[in-house]
Image (cartoon, rainbow, N blue to C red):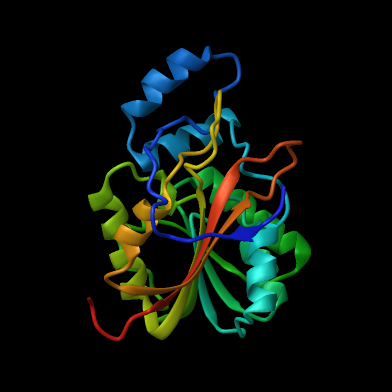
Amino acid sequence: MGRHSIELEGANKALRRIPINQAPGEPSCYTQHREERMSVEELYKERYKTGATPWDIGKPDFNLIETVNKTPIKPCKALDIGCGTGDNSIWLVQQNFQVIGTDASEIAIEKAREKASKANFKCTFIVVDFLKNKIEGAPFGFAFDRGCFHSFNSAEDRQRFAENVAAHLEKDGMWLTIAGNADEQRHGLGPPQRSARDIVDSVEPRFEILSLISSHFGSDRPNPPRAWVCLMRKRDKIR
């Protein structure tokens, strides 16, 4: 499945909220009902406890690698939001970025610290709720999230997320988000899906969209979920 550019106009499709995957041993209908009552932070904490983390592929996402190398994005202070077990953060450190990775899950952060230690790379990982806390070390030159921004169901929460990313970035700072793509007609479980319009409406006031590409998540699955790969630059003034 390849990557291709798309026109933004007319790309707004209906949002389908689909659980990321079912926990081992649970019927999918029960999992969906239970997770719909959880906050985003509670959901991810629960997933790491049960081990139901299909997004944790044990390597950096190829979309991050291609974007950093092709843009290019020069080494700088970077913030990995919802870093999970740290594979993307560690790859950025290998490219000479100074990285702080954040996640709401203590289990994920513990694993991230272990990976960095074993690989002998210096990377800071902290347990924090990104929407409720200011991350020390700001401003950053680059922010990255893979499947964090798309986890918020309401437009208001996604706008708050974008606002908080902007607050952590320096002038002309860059943000790369990888989000589930609502253009995929899926039958079954998978990541939350957002339309191109969902993304544009959430980020446009504070970010200039440099590229919005239809791709797929880095995955070990034979048919990985489709994804939006959106690279943005912080605006000087809110529109």
**Residue at point 73% right, 54% down?**
59
- Percent coordinates x, y for residue 96 in the rendering: 67, 81
Answer with the quarter of the image where residue 37 lies: top left
Answer with the quarter of the image where residue 235 lies: bottom left
Foreground residue among 13 and 232? 13
Horizontal placement of 216 versus 94: left or right?
A: left
- Percent coordinates x, y for residue 191 in the rendering: 52, 38
- Percent coordinates x, y for residue 136 in the rendering: 39, 73
**Residue at point 34% right, 64% down?**
203
Q: Is residue 237 shown above or below 49?
A: below
**Residue at point 40% right, 33% down?**
17
Foreground residue among 17 and 213? 213
Q: Is residue 51 shown above or below 183?
A: above
Foreground residue among 72 and 85? 72
Query: How many numbered discs, if any?
Result: 0
**Residue at point 49% right, 54% down?**
82
